[in-house]
Image (cartoon, rainbow, N blue to C red):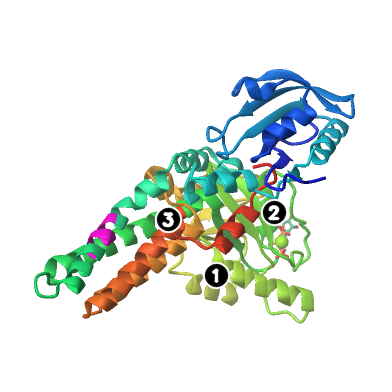
Amino acid sequence: MNEFFDTVFAPSSAVGGAICVIRVSGGHTRAVAQAILDAAVCDSPNLLRRAKILHGGAVVDDCMAVFFRAPKSYTGEDMLELHCHGGFETVRAVLETLSLSGAVPAPAGEFTKRAFLNGKMDLSQAEAVMDVINAQSQNSLRVAVEQLGGSVSRRIRNAEELLLNMRAAIEAAIDYPDEAELDGSHAALLSDAEAELSALIEEGRSGRVLRDGLKVAILGRPNVGKSSLLNALLGQDRAIVTSVEGTTRDVLDERAVLEGVPVRLIDTAGLRDTCDEAERIGVERAKNAMEDADVLLIVLDGSVPTTAAEQALLEETRGRRRIVAANKSDLGTVTDADLAISCKTGEGLETLKARIASFAEAARQSAVCITNERHIRALELALDAVRHAKTQEEPDCIATDVQEALHQLGTITGTDVDAEVIDRIFSNFCVGK
Ligand SMILES: Nc1nc2c(ncn2[C@@H]2O[C@H](COP(=O)(O)OP(=O)(O)OP(=O)(O)O)[C@@H](O)[C@H]2O)c(=O)[nH]1
Ligand SMILES: [Mg+2]
């Protein structure tokens, strides 16, 4: 039993639909197909054929099956896809049959991991697979599909070439100190690499918004209507609303799409000094959410004058990207704010949505390509190394820094990455992908 350790299987579509696709991949795929199918599907690769899945002579399911011959498959290995009936019991029986044939269940992300390890795609493309599946808006889907096509590696190629040229020049200077000297043109190469990396990081910061959503923290003193606003923006009653001050204690983090922009709306506990333990922790969390947010949505009760604490909050957040909204306009407006709104009548809410979405405009308009936090971090480390290289005199020291920058770029595409990092990335995938 389980003698085909290299050959794995997993359902690749949700169980419970009309049809479930179960994938098998690995060196013993043919043997598995022969053991469980009544038709010789491996004799005609890439052709979907009707076949019965058999177990001990009994028919488990009547399905469609297709064989892909290595290396012309998703994983680069021999692969079998079974399109069987999607009912829970059928899928369970087919998986059991596969298990008894000697194949083993695939861990999360195993198929895409094998595709990466077999050179079918680079690491940034493999990561884009999950971004395609998880895309929250048309824009993030478009970018993820481009990344799946290799846009990230194309985008960093320029920086990589500048660094490779730099490395060649330094190596020449080290090997032939009499003939090759490091001159101004080498310093210029480093400056060009610095500019290129800075631009990529800037792009990534706005691109991250497309992928992970614009983080909008809703802040204000108790009872101004923060939770009411969250519900109004979501179009559903998610947060508890009462007339009691201090209703919200925990941080609520909800996804929405406003005017095509994926947004994470974060409702927080009303900011005030309090002796209540749970509420105090809530206020602490609200402050953390404020630090972390891309945009602050500060809610005032527009029907009454602002308090000293609100004035302090407005002062404290002056330099931040923010919208100040005076709620309860249905009760009259006595305070000055960017916008008067009412969660009760809906006044100003459409304008508010448009204002929130406009903060992601840069990401929507420009041809963003880098969106992944891991990639942005690697670019930042590469930039640190290049900046460090600029302060160095000795060719050896410059060479070390340039090599470090190249290494960081290599972690993005996966040409230069630890097994541990690879495992961590694929463990976030779903089973069957
Ligand atoms: N008239 C009027 N009442 C509102 C409006 N928005 C919210 N309220 C009321 O204000 C009270 C407080 O609303 P919440 O949404 O719970 O306020 P909050 O800011 O989340 O309060 P905490 O969670 O305690 O910080 C409730 O009674 C709401 O019905 C509005 O636009 N107009
Ligand atoms: Mg609340």
| 10 Å crowding of disc 2: few (<14), some (14-19), many (20+) | many
Q: Which mark is residue 204?
A: 3
Tell me: is circle 3 under 8 Å from ligand 2.
no
Residue 377: x %, y % from top left: 46, 64
How far apart are the two marked residues, 2 and 1, measured between alpha carbons? 22 Å
| 10 Å crowding of disc 3: few (<14), some (14-19), many (20+) | many
Q: Quadrant of the C terminus?
A: top right
Location of residue 189 (image quadrant): bottom left
Say which of 203 and 420 sits in front.
Answer: 420
Q: Secondary structure at mark 1?
A: helix
Tell me: is circle 2 under 8 Å from ligand 1.
yes
- Please state which amino acid type lies under the numbered disc 3: Gly
User: At 55% from the left edge and 52% from the top edge, which residue is drawn?
Assistant: 212
- Please state which amino acid type lies under the numbered disc 1: Glu
Relative placement, left or right, of 167 versus 81 is left
User: At 47% from the left edge and 48% from the top edge, which residue is drawn?
Assistant: 122
Q: Is residue 163 covered in magenta?
A: yes
- Please state which amino acid type lies under the numbered disc 2: Ser
Q: Quadrant of the N terminus?
A: top right
Chain part drawn in magenta: 161-166
How far apart are the two marked residues, 3 and 2, measured between alpha carbons? 33 Å
| 10 Å crowding of disc 1: few (<14), some (14-19), many (20+) | few
Residue at image mark 2: 228
Q: Nearer the viewer, mark 2 or mark 1?
A: 1
Residue 86: x %, y % from top left: 79, 29
Q: Which mark is residue 223?
A: none
Mark found first going from the N terminus, 1 or 3: 3
Location of residue 105 (image quadrant): top right
